[in-house]
């Protein structure tokens, strides 16, 4: 009579067990370098937007370089090249103001594969669009300030940016800004701003209707 085979004490690894031992998939991020041609306000706004959006698909490095537009573009290209592939996109945030090297800056940006968010005349136009449409020409911050003052109990202040004031409205600003000028022509059209493209790159998604 044949003897019964004694079952082995070792278990065969299950399919699920082998899967569970695979290394986890690491989600890639879009790494942005943003160089601002002015101090404080732009930086504080962008940091506030990044924190508010909680978009884990994007990482953000912000550098201030208050110079003329073409100098800012050159500096952004230098930082990107020194980083040796650390960034996927490089942006410059620029005001038109009274600068005369706008076309030079745009030509340099195209040549060096740098995105530009021009505000014409200045960044405060982008802030104003959070609260209302604005299509009247303005040639300086002084001309825009009275419109912004209407939306702040104590008047608008360039320092002490509190993003919470803008947080509920940034997608509305995207919608309004898109209507003012063709993308890439903001340095030619007053008023207009290309900040909506950078806002979407940081915040993610398309604006709500």
Image (cartoon, helix red, strand yellow):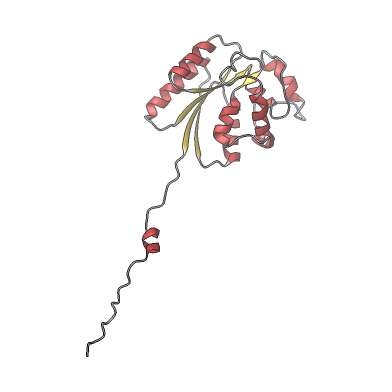
* Residue 198 x/y as whole percent: 56, 29
Residue 177: where, in percent of width, then height? Answer: 65, 25
For residue 89, above or below residue 106: below
Identify which residue, 139 or 200, lies in the foreground.
200
Residue 162 in view (yes/no): no
Q: Residue at x 72, y 21 (%)?
A: 134
Quarter occupied by the C terminus: top right
Q: How many marks?
A: 0
Q: Residue furthest front?
A: 1
Snapshot quadrant of residue 191:
top right
Q: Residue lying furthest left in this view?
A: 1
Residue furthest top in the image: 100
Q: Is residue 57 visible?
A: yes
Q: Is residue 3 left or right of residue 78?
A: left
Percent x, y of residue 116: 53, 22
Residue 187 vs residue 122, the one in the foreground? 187
Q: Is residue 55 above or below residue 134?
A: below
Quadrant (top left/top right/bottom left/bottom right) for the N terminus: bottom left
Residue lying farthest bottom? Answer: 1
């Amino acid at each position: 009579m044949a003897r019964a085979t004694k079952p082995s004490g070792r278990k065969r690894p299950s399919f699920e067990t082998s899967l569970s031992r695979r290394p986890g998939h690491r989600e890639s991020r879009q790494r942005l370098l943003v160089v601002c041609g002015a101090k404080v306000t732009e930086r504080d706004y962008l940091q506030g937007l990044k924190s508010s959006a909680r978009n884990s698909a994007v990482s953000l490095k912000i550098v201030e370089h208050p110079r003329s537009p073409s100098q800012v573009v050159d500096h952004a290209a230098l930082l990107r090249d020194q980083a040796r592939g650390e960034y996927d996109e490089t942006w410059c945030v620029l005001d038109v103001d009274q600068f005369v090297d706008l076309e030079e800056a745009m030509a340099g940006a195209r040549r060096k594969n740098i995105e530009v968010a021009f505000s014409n005349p200045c960044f405060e136009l982008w802030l104003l669009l959070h609260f209302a449409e604005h299509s009247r020409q303005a040639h300086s911050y002084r001309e825009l300030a009275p419109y912004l003052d209407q939306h702040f109990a104590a008047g608008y202040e360039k320092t002490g940016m509190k993003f919470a004031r803008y947080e509920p409205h940034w997608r509305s600003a995207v919608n309004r800004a898109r209507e003012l000028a063709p993308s890439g022509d903001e340095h030619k059209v007053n008023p207009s701003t290309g900040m909506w493209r950078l806002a979407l790159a940081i915040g993610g998604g398309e604006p709500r209707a």
